[in-house]
Image (cartoon, grey):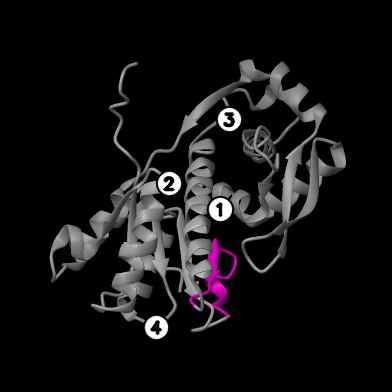
Amino acid sequence: MTEDKRPKPTCFVIQSFDGGTYDRRYRETIKPALLKAEVEPQRADEILGLNPVIDKIETAIESASICIAEVSEDNPNVWLELGYALALDRPTVILCDKSKREKLPFDIQHRPIIFYRTDSRSGYEELESSIVKWIRNELDSSKRISNIRMLKPGSEKATDFEDYEVAILSLAFAFWPTTSGSIGHWQLEQKLKEMNFTEIALALGVSGLVEKGYLNEKLLIDTDYNNEEYKAYSVTNAAIKWLQENKNLLEVKKQVISDDYYDKDIPF
């Protein structure tokens, strides 16, 4: 059997360096979890030395496949690096010790967050398991929607759908083979924004597709985040049939990153 030579995805770990609690948590829990998820861990002090330069950290975040940010305590550097990762729309999993804080700033409450316990060995085991699950899930989601079917140029008149409706159908269809068979509202909103569609396009598209019978909306329970409910969307059989019958009108649209992509405002 030929050995897979493809490089592993990388995960940049945003965390305080304290020579104690957080360094130990990285070595004993976070890093082993990332390796188990088949991701290459990177932390600033490991790849840049003891005195990391902000430019090099930004470059590491830009090149990372995914990030993890430990926000249990307020550290200006951690919040700055997390903000930069989110401004780049880098898939990011946030960690927070329940004993330190139970609520996070409004701007990040809707993102993937693992609230973990440190009062017993089982708490660390749960943290490791959750990291493996979330990293795999975020990378899989990112991969699914990095190349999606969109209308070919000039095909707009050949369909009764608006271009944003086709984008919504395509994104939802990309998640049809998954366990939940649906895409979360936040994920859908973020991807449409990347395609330069507005919140109005999202609202019009979802409401129109639901009314036409091409999209289902439902409430799911996030068992990894305090059993919070979140809205998700799935394609109907009619939508799948339409996509199959009109695949000649579609093309794979690859994401092209422009020079001003990295000039987005930090979302705090």
- The kind of residue on which mark 4 rests is Asp
Is label 2 or label 3 in front? 2
Q: SS for tag 2?
A: loop
Cα–Cα span, label 2 and label 4: 28 Å
Indicate left or right for 150 with 216 as reference: left
Q: Which mark is residue 74?
A: 4
Neighbours of disc 1 within 10 Å: few (<14), some (14-19), many (20+): some
Q: Are marks 3 and 1 in contact (CB under 8 Å)?
A: no
Q: SS for tag 1?
A: helix
- The kind of residue on which mark 3 rests is Met
Residue at figure coordinates x 58%, y 28% from the top left = 149
Which corner quadrant holds the N terminus?
A: top left
Q: Which mark is residue 150?
A: 3
- Give the residue at mark 1: 190
Neighbours of disc 2 within 10 Å: few (<14), some (14-19), many (20+): some
Whether residue 153 is visible to the viewer of this picture, yes or no, is: no
Q: Could you say which quadrant of the image residue 148 lies in?
A: top right
Q: Are marks 2 and 4 in contact (CB under 8 Å)?
A: no
Label whose residue precedes the other's in the sequence (3 or 1):
3
Cα–Cα span, label 4 and label 1: 26 Å
Q: Which mark is residue 37?
A: 2
Q: Are marks 2 and 3 in contact (CB under 8 Å)?
A: no
Label whose residue precedes the other's in the sequence (1 or 2):
2
Residue stretch rendered in magenta on the structure? 103-118
Q: Are marks 3 and 4 in contact (CB under 8 Å)?
A: no
Cα–Cα span, label 3 and label 4: 42 Å
